Image (spheres, grey):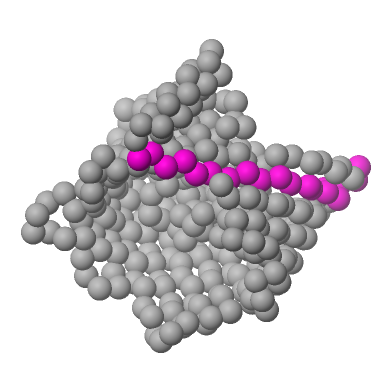
Amino acid sequence: MLKDLFLSLVSLLLVSTLFSQTKISGYLQYQYRVEFKDQRTETFTPGTINLKFSGSLSPKVKWEIQFGVKEMSFNKFLKDYYIELVNPFNGISGLDLKFGQFKYYWSIERKESSSDRKTIHRSQVVSGLVADRDRGLEITYSGVKNLKLAIGFWNGDVVYKDIGKVSETIECTRNMDDSDAKKDITGFVSYNYNINDGNSFLVQAAYLYGSNGRYAIGKKTRYGFGVDGYFINKNLQLRGEFIGGSDDNVKKEGYYVQASYRIFDFLEPVLKYEWWDSDKDKVGKSNWLTLGLYSKVLDNVVLRLNYVIKKEKDLNEEKNDELLFMIQVKL
Ligand SMILES: [Ca+2]
Ligand SMILES: [Ca+2]
């Protein structure tokens, strides 16, 4: 039934494409992964296959729908759907309104496209404390030079993966029925400065306050705060994020720092260190060290090779290091 619905939607969009200015884009990923457990596993997996349809109804009204073609669960397959009003009010320039489901402004890593991400995995702290996509409304203001401000209101329902374990992260936040508990409210500020040609830095801060109605705990509060930034010097990129927060009385915290250097397009070594504590009052933290290569072979093709050393601090060490290779093609 879901497949039928999906196929009819895609055909509708393809037909409308023939008669309009709809743009189709997307990407495919293919991944080879070795997990060095007691029993070593080697797996080939199609990572993500995303198909995006977007267009403008007028210069001030844009829309986008994005499907994760491989995702068969309804909570995941419909990724983005939104309408964006660009400068809707004459006299206030730099003001945008966005309604629907999408990645709102919060962390650098969550907002950046997966083909620009230097490592294959997202950081644990970003996966653990920042919703992937959510349903709501975002107001953005970028009318002052170098500065961007955003506030948003979101459904805020969260489902966790590996709940209670040191590896706990957010499993999904999208396509969930609104529990009608109070909305999440987010605030975001970003300052971007070009020092000179090729040298720039960015600093950002974000805050979230809301509730998590999924666990029949409408009164349980949830909050998070984050600071992140990067410095780019032509080929060198240094960046980091710190995020802390809580879900009711469970306090969570983590950060990552990452350095990459582009020797040339084909060869960009990456080093990333991350630390994640899914429950500050319980023993156990997770430390990952990623040694990687990021390689932009052609404009549309990115190759990545990562070795991830995973340490479970203050717990029985688990054998779970990973070797990953991923090819990603942009359409
Ligand atoms: Ca802990
Ligand atoms: Ca380990």
The kind of secondary structure the magenta stretch mainly shows is strand
Q: Residue at x 63, y 50 (%)?
A: 329
Residue 141, image quadrant: bottom left
Q: Is residue 280 visible?
A: no
Q: Position of residue 12 (x, y in %)?
A: 42, 24
At horizontal 53% and vertical 81% (from top left) the residue drawn is 234
Q: Position of residue 205 (x, y in %)?
A: 38, 64
Left or right of 97 in this view: 293: right
Which of the image's four quarters has the N terminus? top right
In the drawing, does residue 204 fall left or right of residue 268?
Answer: left
257 part of magenta stretch: no
| Residue lying at 75% horizontally and 60% vertically, measured from the top left | 305
Numbered circles on residues, count:
0
Looking at the picture, tell me which residue is in the foreground, 246 or 107. 107
The residue closer to the viewer here, 320 or 21, is 21
Q: Is residue 127 left or right of residue 215?
A: right
Residue 326 visible in the displayed image? yes
Where 163 sits versus 319, above or below? Answer: above
Q: Position of residue 132 (x, y in %)?
A: 49, 44
**Residue 70 in which image quadrant:** top right
Segment tinted magenta in the rendering: 21-39
Residue 19 point in image, percent of width and height: 36, 31
* Near-viewer residue (19 or 228): 19
